Amino acid sequence: MSRLSAWLRRGLRALRNPLGGDSDADRTRSDLVLVGGLVVGVYVLFTVMALLGPFDGVGNVLSQLETVTLLVLVYVMLALALNLQWGYAGLLNLGVAGFMAIGAYTMAMLSAAPDATVPGLGLPLGVGIVGGFLAATLFGALAALPAIRLRADYLAIVTLAFSEIIRLVVRSEAASEFTIAGQRLGTGGASTFPLPPNPVKVLLYENPGEPLVAAVDSPTVLGDLMLETAAVFNLSASQAENILYTLLLLIPVGAFYLLLTRIGNSPFGRVLRAIREDELVAGSLGKNTRRFKITTFAVGCGLMGLAAILWQLQGQGRLSPGTFEPELTFFVFVALILGGSGSNTGSVVGGIVFAAVLLEGPRALKRVIDENFDISADPDTIIEASQGVEPLFAYLLSDSSIEALRFIMLGVVLVYLMQRRPQGLLGHRRGQAATISLPTREDEP
Amino acid sequence: MAVRDSPGRVLSSLRVNLLPALLAVLGLVLLLDLGRRLVIGGLTLSALVRFLWTGLVRGMAIGLAGIGLSLTYSILGFANFAHGDYITVGAFAGWVTTFVVAGVGSVGLDLLVLVSSDASAGELGINVLSTPVAIAAGLVVAAGITALTTVALDRVVFRPMRDANGIALLIASVGVALALRYTLLILFSGSVRTLTTDVPTTAVGVGSGEVVFRAHDVTVVVLAGLLMLGTHLLLQYTKLSTAMRAMADNKELALVTGIPTERVIRTTWLLGGALTGAAGFLIALQLGGMSTTLGWDRLLLVFAAVILGGVGSIYGAIVGGLIIGITIRLSLVWLPNELSIASAFVVLVFMLLVRPNGLLGRVETV
């Protein structure tokens, strides 16, 4: 018990004092406590909100928690990938949404059936996922090759322009269906692109390709287990599938974290930090800074593409070019800045806080308010709404206004962070300069 | 060392020599293809003139919007991503005024203030010939409100961050952009509204076809031209531009020399904001419609214009705007409509590769 409280204290201290000179192992433990505490807090908060909202059985609560978890995991992955580019190497990439689109659409074009409404190559999903990752990496490298030597603000504008070009091409009539070497391909244009079924189906059903109603009749051992568990909680099969998918998503998220921490602590990561602090010095020490930056940019973009694939494969399984608007890029930036760029744990914390509190929080809160307060007014315009307190609330709580309020809040948070705490919650913690962990004095209060 | 450096050197020599040559060849090919299409008949002369004219119209509006961005970019040292939404603020402030002036008495005031689609544009009959007063009033208010908005936002957001680096300011400006756009969305709703009706036109015969000149296109070109001329005179005959140049060059030195930097910054925001608001109003006039994404949708084009012309040069912003406008329209010869915007971004990327300081850019001065 006392050890736990000591860990907790360290976790809180890490939050208060990002430059605290704890040893490596101590920091890992305190980070774990911090992230764990945050996750528990988010779940408690959302469970309470789900119970206060239109309560519809345990399954419904679980399903709502699943939605939050999926978003959290996706933004953790995206923030980690962006952290490699911006936090470590100082590359301001405003094209996140574009590289995500490349990953997701390449995967879809490789894996979709040749006779589907939007034709693809019909390759196995695994090939599609790897292909999507490689395509995003390749496009990252192609964009970086010329753009990387530009000043940070020009790089931002060029990458944003690049992502807009991608989005415009994807949604254009010309790309919606075309033929290369006798092979029909397409992006679906401005409408949606149906994706291959949720990949967990392969684990669950003997005939994963069939529609769900038929597929549940012949489950595998695992599928049987899942369906029985789902029946206990009164969950539908598709809800249970989603929950399983989200749980399995923890594996790639963990892999992202380990990979990026490994990169960050490696000699490669040290060079990146040196470039961020002073490129001239890094160059003078004989490092080919250009090549380091291009590699970093390409790997980061590939990971963004992969995150987009893992995100889009779940749920209703449709790609839409509207998903990849520049707002998405800013979302990832808010997540990263919130947690603190330059710190992988910070990216995780930022992803959790952003997705849970800023992205899903307002929606859950709206459900609670809708359920518990009887607001009868339904004004159409702000002028009608300004006639009283109740109409004003009704107007601000309408679906479109809640979305807008969310964006306003994001904007305010962004400005506040840049003014008051540009390092975020855990940003730019002191990195290890040596290859081995250096013991530091334990200064407990 | 020498061995490790050589790929970089090869690349940079490629960039210095080969890339411009390649682009020149590409430009020549496109020009020749244009001529071929004119001769063969894939493209009529009147269509070409129409593309150039509409490109000019768009370019003037983009250039006008770019002046403000270019000025603040150079003296404050950051790319202001909220600039697009300043354009939207101008459009809405101006069109609220125009609607109220044109429709007061005949249509309910609440519909007019909201520039509501229910206040049918047909009923109001707004166009430059039948309601010139309403349009003039809209232009003035658009400039005024936007100027005040930019100064107020500078006070709240950017002024406490004067010592921060350009990237921190850039990210803060993204926050301003989001907050501003979605505030407008809550106030005015996101619908696309029609603003003008029965716009007078004149057709002029060119070659075998004819080119239609819309009155609002002409208005935009004339008014934007006048505003640009006014800005030129203002900067030419006051000390303001000298002070701006000094600040863009070295802020500490400017302060030591006795230049009231905060006042110069405020004046710059007022001037840039007014031009931006006017541009927003004129863009909506030319389109005959607007929504809350009007400015954001054009932000990258304005950035492209400013960077193309050279950050800090108002003439650069104007020239850049014209190049971008004409590129977008002329690209229709080869590209489908939905990809024409992308052509402007491609021009921007190539420009940054070949000449990062822009066409008229010295070292970031006014």
Image (spheres, coloured by chain):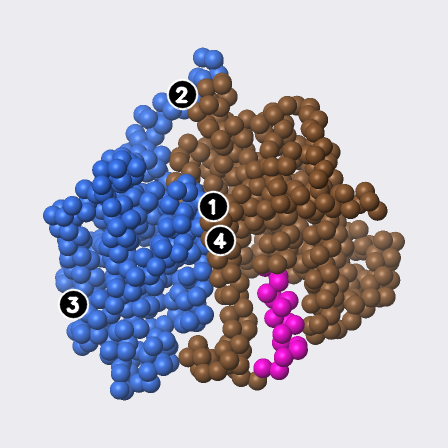
Chain colours: A brown, B blue
Residue that carries the numbered disc 4 in the rendered image: A416
- Image spot of residue A23 (x, y percent): 70, 32
Check residue B202 in the rendering and tell me which mark sits there, or answer none: 3
Which residue is situated farthest in the top direction here? B2
- Image spot of residue B255 (x, y percent): 27, 40
Callout 1 amino acid: Leu
Seen at 64% across and 55% down, the residue is A71
Which residue is situated farthest in the bottom direction here? B106
Q: CA distance from mark 2 to mark 1?
A: 29 Å
Task: Please rate how many residues cluster around mark 3, counting C-alpha atoms within 10 Å: few if below 14, some from 14 to 19, many from 20.
Answer: few
Instruction: Tell me if A242 is positioned left or right of B100 in this view.
Output: right
Sequence-earlier tag: 4 or 1 = 1
Q: CA distance from mark 4 to mark 1?
A: 20 Å
Res. B107 visible in picture: yes
Which residue is situated farthest in the front direction here? A445
Magenta range is A359-375
Viewer-nearest of discs 3 and 1: 1
Chain at numbered mark 4:
A
Viewer-nearest of discs 2 and 1: 1
Depicted A400 relative to depicted B353: above or below: below
Callout 2 amino acid: Val
Q: Secondary structure at mark 2?
A: helix
Residue that carries the numbered disc 1 in the rendered image: A94
Chain at numbered mark 2:
B
Q: CA distance from mark 3 to mark 2?
A: 56 Å
Q: Secondary structure at mark 4?
A: helix
> Looking at the image, which is closer to me, A19 or A143?
A19
> Looking at the image, which is closer to me, B170 or B50?
B170
Viewer-nearest of discs 2 and 4: 4
